[in-house]
Amino acid sequence: MDVTLGEEHEALRRTVEEFAREVVAPAAPGFDATGNFPYEIVRQMADMGLFGLPFPECYGGMGGDYFALCLAIEELARADSSVAITLEAGVGLGAMPLYRFGNEEQKSHWLPRLCSGTALGAFGLTEPGGGSDAGGTRTRAEIVDGEWVINGSKAFITNAGTDITELVSVTAVTGQRADGRKEISALLVPVPRAGFTAGPPYSKVGWHASDTRELAFENCRVPAANLLGERGRGYANFLSILDEGRIAIAALAVGLAQACVDASVAFAKERRSMGRAIASYQAIAFSIADMEVRAHTARLAYYAAAARLLAGQPFKKEAAMAKLYASEIAVTNARAATQVHGGYGVINDYPVARHWRDSKILEIGEGTSEVQRILIARELGLRPSV
């Protein structure tokens, strides 16, 4: 497999790299300290067309592909994970379900604003009592007088409470299947909406500038036409969105892992101990070399998964492997970078402290490491008990 980027992909990567270095990185410590959502940076990302990268031009998109989105996410994550996850969730979770499963009227109405980045969408799947058991959905919706009436709650939802959030796609139990299992459908909820409440932002260990909230639905009514995709296919459709999203999360993890390498190389060349730069000590040099190997290998994994996605080949196993490996090496690299920095590694003035805090969620969001191992085992024909 040729992993050399084509001209267009490389041009995009360089453009986002420059933006991340010159705009995102200097602002990241301030947003991390205050927890404020980076509206101005998001506006500039919108002006660059990043929110429309993988969507056709007829909907206001850039006519690119999912790999282009992943490249942009990786470069942003080298500067700040909160900004990177805002893009990943806005595109991969907020807009992609609409593009994949919406009818033409829904796509024509919503996608242009989501692609422009002037509006954000969110993806309401996880529930407070569900965790990885997304199939244990308790939120319910029923048709009353020609409208869906939604009651329930969702947890850990990204981009759901910003000033520019205009849409939440939400799964809900809409009936019972013939085999007795829950019929789960997806619905489009415009924001703001009577009966819809976005709770206060969570106080999180990392991703401080990312908007993450619990959502509540209390007799929230939306038109019957706001059914997204086929009735009863909501859960299955959302799981396919998560398969794609795992490639993007792997890209984000690679960006963080590479940022740890970058910071450690720079620090090791400048920091002196016993009369010489610590980079000259084998223990430090080898630790950083191992960090580079991990980041490089994880990048190859998400490149391969993205290639299968774009080729229309099965990619569930490859996406799970990329997400599993990249997220775990991001945590490892963040820990190693902190060690290289010594006492400075736990001082928030240094980016590795932020990378350390930001890394852990990567092993949890969009499917825990345990879930990825279950998926990989199943693709190998194994049936691990859960």
Image (cartoon, rainbow, N blue to C red):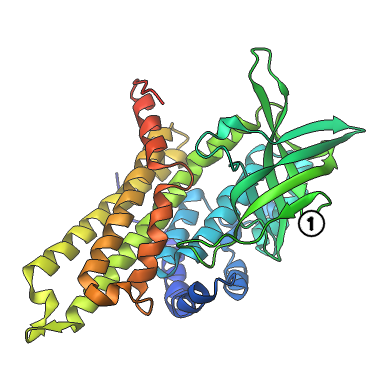
Quadrant of res 217: top right
Residue at horizontal 42 percent and vertical 70 percent from the top: 79
90 to the left or right of 33:
right
Question: What crowding class fits label 1: few (fewer than 14 Cα within 10 Å), some (14-19), or many (20 or more)?
Answer: some
Q: Is residue 85 visible?
A: yes
Q: Is residue 10 visible?
A: no
375 to the left or right of 32:
left
Assign the C terminus to one quadrant of the image.
Answer: top left
Quadrant of res 284: bottom left
**135 in relation to 274, above or below:** above
Quadrant of res 251: bottom left
Residue beneath disc 1: 192
Q: Nearer the viewer, residue 364 or 100?
A: 364
Residue at horizontal 23 percent and vertical 78 percent from the top: 267
Residue at horizontal 45 percent and vertical 77 percent from the top: 29
Secondary structure of the residue carrying tag 1 is loop
Where in the figure is residue 166, as x and y percent of width and height? 73, 57
**204 in relation to 44, above or below:** above
